[in-house]
Image (cartoon, helix red, strand yellow):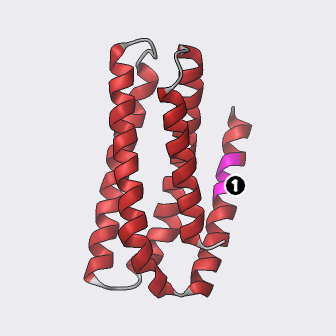
Amino acid sequence: MKATDLLKKQHKEVKSLFKKIEDTDSPRQRRQMLDKVAKNLEGHTLIEEEIFYPAVRGLDTRKAEEMVLEAYEEHHVVKLVLAELPRVDPEDERFEAKMTVLSELVEHHADEEEKEMFKLAQKLGKDELEALGERMQERFEAFRQRGSQAA
């Protein structure tokens, strides 16, 4: 699977989880789904930052450099919000507000990547995108396995 297709699939999965959280009244279920969102985002940002962004940055254009730097900063903000959520009770009114902010941040980031960065990434070529996708999938799976062993 091409790197861009893998990332789009993950974007879609996380957006779907946010929708489920929004539609759930049970604080316990909201917390469980949030934990799943956090784990997915952690693995997703890991493979983007370790593998995908360096490849895009390697295109060595000003546009690629700007997009990658902005993406790193967006990841940083998402990580800050994620770090606060475990301390917020799912029944607290701030929980929903933070979830909304996090969801909007992630949606904006994903949409921007898909519309702009993925278009630019096509310059890497189909074979390179396939190879990157394979590496990213392996790294993501290794991350998930490590995480489930720690739990």
Q: Confirm whether residue 43 shows in the render.
A: no
Alpha-carbon neighbours of circle 1 within 10 Å: few (<14), some, or many (≥20)?
A: few
Q: Which residue is mark 1?
A: 141
Residue lying at 39% horizontally and 58% vertically, measured from the top left: 111
The N terminus - image quarter: bottom right
Secondary structure under tag 1 reads: helix
Rendering coords of residue 137 (x, y %): 66, 63
Question: Of 145 and 67, which appears nearest the observer?
Answer: 67
Residue farthest toward the top in the current orientation of the protein: 91
Vertical arrangement, residue 49 with respect to residue 88, above or below: below
Rendering coords of residue 87 (x, y %): 42, 20
Residue lying at 57% horizontally and 30% vertically, measured from the top left: 33
Q: Main secondary structure of the magenta part?
A: helix
Amino acid carrying mark 1 in the image: Glu
Residue lying at 59% horizontally and 36% vertically, measured from the top left: 36
The C terminus - image quarter: top right
Q: Which residues are magenta?
A: 140-144
